Amino acid sequence: MAAAECPVCNWKIENGGNDVMVAGKTLTVCCDDCAQKLKADPDRYARRSQARD
C-alpha cells in the first residue's frame, strides 16, 4: 500500500507517486523533486515515511 502523504513535503500522493529505494526499503514520494531530496538526505525523511519492503 502506498503512503497517503509524501514524507518530504506532506502533499497528498496522487497517481501512485514515485517509488524511491533507500536503505533497502521502498518509499513513495509525490514527485521527482521530492525523490531527489529523499535521495540526498534519506535519514531526514525516512523517519516520517510509511516505509514498505
Image (cartoon, rainbow, N blue to C red):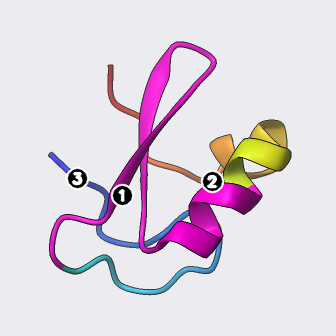
From the viewer's perspective, is residue 6 above or below residue 21? below
Of helix, strand and loop, which one carries label 3? loop
Type of amino acid at the residue the image marks with label 1: Asn
In-image side of 40 versus 18 (left or right): right
In three-dimensional space, the C-alpha distance between marks 2 and 1, rounded to whole angstroms, equals 16 Å
Which residue does the numbered mark 3 point to in the structure image?
Answer: 2
Quadrant (top left/top right/bottom left/bottom right) for the N terminus: top left
Mark whose residue sits in front, 2 or 3: 3
Q: Earlier in the sequence, mark 1 or mark 3?
A: 3
Q: Is residue 45 magenta?
A: no
First in sequence: mark 2 or mark 3? 3
Q: Is residue 35 left or right of residue 16?
A: right
Q: Residue furthest top?
A: 24
Label 2 or label 1, whichever lies nearer to me, is 1
Q: CA distance from mark 2 to mark 3?
A: 14 Å
Which circle's residue, 2 or 1, is located before the other in the chain?
A: 1
- Marks 1/3: CA–CA distance: 10 Å
Element on which disc 2 rests: loop
SS for callout 1: strand
Count up the numbered dots.
3
Q: Which residues are magenta?
A: 15-37
According to the picture, the residue beneath numbered tag 1 turns out to be 18
Residue that label 2 marks: 48
**Image quarter in which the C terminus is found:** top left
List x then y, in percent, for residue 37: 75, 60
What is the crowding at mark 2: few (fewer than 14 residues within 10 Å), some, or many (at least 20)?
few
